[in-house]
Image (cartoon, rainbow, N blue to C red):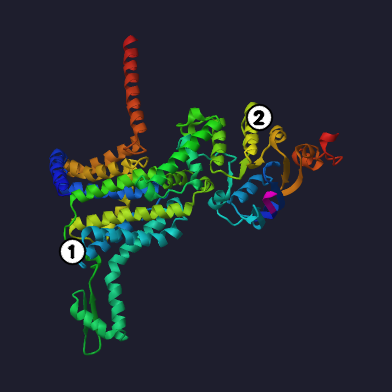
């Protein structure tokens, strides 16, 4: 394993030198890889015909769970990310069962709602626990064990004034400030490895019974159920898988940035993830991967244009959507585009010829 | 022995009675026709049998087992498949892949087995692919094996849908207007295909407007009009039944007797 990682680091150094004209530094590359993983998580649901935008919420769950496990409990990175994935997968089941009965834009709205619930829970978790402990202290429930816990733990602080007022201070998720001082444990090769594992998983999925059932459900849900496909089951399995991939992306990115806070996982993120899939195309898994990488690299690459950067970035995206409506990774679309421009050119030449003749 | 039995089945959509107290018995190994004017409730009945819709009242029994509350995929698993009036193939997939999906209920390999190429997955995949190829040959579709189903010719799409219904190894196939849009030669060929299925021991319930096909293949015919079963008998009996003629052609205002008889 050791020499493989060395080899990879060599490769990465050369890659970064090659990419340096595009302004892609290692943190940017890491950001691109995390985005690619997120793109694959939404690809799974879109491929099954589910317009689910819950990925941001599951990413937050994965990030918070794994960061708490490494930072507070001292677990290893791989084990805590795996636990984050499992927790997200378990939470996905009771969410998916009722919500996946919805379709299209209604499903999108319900899943955005889920993401907001997660974000607001993370924001207010400490306050909730604080008021709960305060209530327990006032009612003298488990009083002694709470007080002794407060004396030993730096998370919990209980002061009881002479006039009977109770002050409780609890800090775990840090509210809007988030969790700080996370050890930077993730490395680029881990992101690459995980991305490759997910891609392999998806390639095999497409060649399995479940993968074919997913494609069938996207095209015609009723006909799929008449083929003997348990539509509810397949949809929920895919939702869980997608949640787990998003949670892994959260865990990995949490250990890259030193700090996580609830605003990282809001509606903006969900829109970004959807944009990866739309820009890259959802016909193959390569679409969201390429879409995510391009979308993340573009603002850096265009740094040279300074204040025109945002404008040019927007124009490139607009052009891509207009001329390649089914995504950047669309062989047919590229051929069509080439043919379109070639035809135009020959037509123009003919017009020139005609004009010259007359 | 009946394979399918409908007992007092009703289906109401609000105030509209799509089916009203329908009784029907389909015997094992027979080809049974279901005819009736447009809007008579034929497709509603097929939807109720295949589990896409559920009756308001009454019972549907398949091999003595009540199925009217089952989900569609369970009904497919116990042996009923169908085709649709407006073809519903998986258009973005090849003809071959459509037949793989059609065999979904027969597969057992899990995702884990396919992830690591375990023997059961490989074995199963081989048998499924082989069966798909056989079915394509049986329906004369070898030339379109790797063509996207959505781009096939109309007749090929109809044939592929029938092959897909057969792929799950059903005991009963429900055909919803299989010859719609076909010319007489194609219709006759399809009739022979239906008879071949019957020879394989498969029971068939077919909705049809084409009386020549009904005569060619059906052992028994049921007639539905405004949600009610108005007649039942052999194709010849049905053709002579005044109620049926009235339902299809209307009655003479003066005599209240069927026009065809005058």
**Residue A318 x/y as whole percent:** 31, 40
Whether residue A52 is in magenta: the answer is no
User: Is A138 placed above or below B9 here?
Assistant: below
Q: Main secondary structure of the magenta part?
A: strand
Mark drawn on residue B21: none
**Residue A201 x/y as whole percent:** 33, 47
Q: Residue at x 23, y 90 (%)?
A: A163
Q: Does B198 sit left or right of A44 as displayed?
A: right
Mark drawn on residue B188: 2
Chain of the residue where label 1 is placed in the rendered structure: A
The total of numbered circles placed on residues is: 2
Q: Viewer-proximal residue, A75 or A122?
A: A75
Residue behind mark 1 = A180
Q: Does B10 sit left or right of A198 as displayed?
A: right
Chain of the residue where label 2 is placed in the rendered structure: B
**Residue A294 x/y as whole percent:** 25, 42
Q: Residue at x 64, y 32 (%)?
A: B192
Give SS at disc 2: helix
User: Is A142 placed above or below A81 here?
Assistant: below
Magenta region: which residues?
B1-6
Q: Quadrant of the C terminus of chain B?
A: top right
Residue A288 seen anywhere in this rendered image of the structure: yes
Asked if labels 1 and 2 share a chain, the reply is no
């Amino acid at each position: 394993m050791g020499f493989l990682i060395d080899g990879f680091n060599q490769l990465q150094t050369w890659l970064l030198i090659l990419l340096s004209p595009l302004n892609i530094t290692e943190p940017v590359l890491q950001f691109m890889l995390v985005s690619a993983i997120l793109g694959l998580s939404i690809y799974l649901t879109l491929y099954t015909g589910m317009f689910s935008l819950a990925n941001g919420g599951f990413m937050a769950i994965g990030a918070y769970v794994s960061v708490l496990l490494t930072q507070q409990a001292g677990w290893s990175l791989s084990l805590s990310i795996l636990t984050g994935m499992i927790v997200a997968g378990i939470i996905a089941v009771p969410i998916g069962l009722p919500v996946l009965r919805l379709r299209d834009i209604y499903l999108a709205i319900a899943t955005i709602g889920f993401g907001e619930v997660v974000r607001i829970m993370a924001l207010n978790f400490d306050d909730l626990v604080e008021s709960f402990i305060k209530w327990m202290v006032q009612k003298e429930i488990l009083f002694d064990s709470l007080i002794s816990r407060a004396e030993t733990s730096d998370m919990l602080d209980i002061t009881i004034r002479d006039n009977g007022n109770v002050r409780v201070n609890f800090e775990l998720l840090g509210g809007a400030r988030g969790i700080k001082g996370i050890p930077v444990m993730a490395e680029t090769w881990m992101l690459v490895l995980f991305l490759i594992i997910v891609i392999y998983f998806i390639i095999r999925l497409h060649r399995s019974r479940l993968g074919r059932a997913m494609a069938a459900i996207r095209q015609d849900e009723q006909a799929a159920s008449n083929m003997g496909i348990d539509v509810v089951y397949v949809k929920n399995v895919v939702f869980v898988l997608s949640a787990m991939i998003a949670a892994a992306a959260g865990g990995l990115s949490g250990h890259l940035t030193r700090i996580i806070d609830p605003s990282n996982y809001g509606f903006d993120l969900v829109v970004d993830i959807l944009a990866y899939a739309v820009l890259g195309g959802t016909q193959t898994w390569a679409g969201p991967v390429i879409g995510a990488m391009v979308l993340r690299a573009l603002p850096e690459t265009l740094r040279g244009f300074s204040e025109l950067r945002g404008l040019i970035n927007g124009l490139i995206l607009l052009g891509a959507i207009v001329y390649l409506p089914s995504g950047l990774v669309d062989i047919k679309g590229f051929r069509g585009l080439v043919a379109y421009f070639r035809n135009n050119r020959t037509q123009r030449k003919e017009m020139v010829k005609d004009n010259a003749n007359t | 022995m009946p394979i399918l039995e409908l007992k007092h089945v009703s289906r109401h959509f609000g105030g509209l009675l799509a089916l009203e107290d329908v009784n029907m018995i389909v015997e094992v190994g027979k080809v049974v026709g279901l005819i009736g004017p447009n809007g008579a409730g034929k497709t509603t009945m097929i939807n109720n049998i295949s589990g896409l819709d559920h009756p308001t009242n009454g019972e549907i029994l398949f091999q003595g087992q009540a199925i009217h509350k089952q989900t569609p995929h369970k009904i497919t698993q116990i042996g009923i498949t169908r085709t649709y009036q407006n073809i519903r193939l998986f258009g973005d997939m090849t003809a071959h892949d459509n037949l793989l999906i059609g065999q979904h209920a027969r597969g057992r390999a899990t995702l884990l087995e396919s992830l690591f190429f375990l023997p059961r997955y490989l074995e199963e995949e081989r048998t499924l692919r082989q069966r798909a190829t056989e079915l394509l040959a049986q329906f004369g579709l070898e030339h379109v094996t790797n063509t996207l189903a959505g781009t096939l010719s109309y007749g090929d799409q109809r044939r592929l849908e029938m092959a897909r219904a057969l792929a799950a190894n059903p005991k009963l196939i429900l055909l919803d207007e299989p010859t719609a849009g076909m010319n007489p030669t194609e219709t006759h060929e399809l009739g022979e295909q239906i008879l071949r299925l019957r020879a394989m021991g498969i029971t068939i319930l077919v909705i049809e407007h084409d009386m020549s096909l009904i005569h060619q293949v059906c052992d028994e015919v049921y007639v539905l009009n405004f949600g009610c079963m108005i007649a039942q008998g052999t194709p010849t009996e049905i053709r002579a039944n005044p109620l049926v003629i009235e339902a299809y052609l209307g009655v003479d205002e003066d005599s209240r007797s069927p026009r065809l008889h005058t």
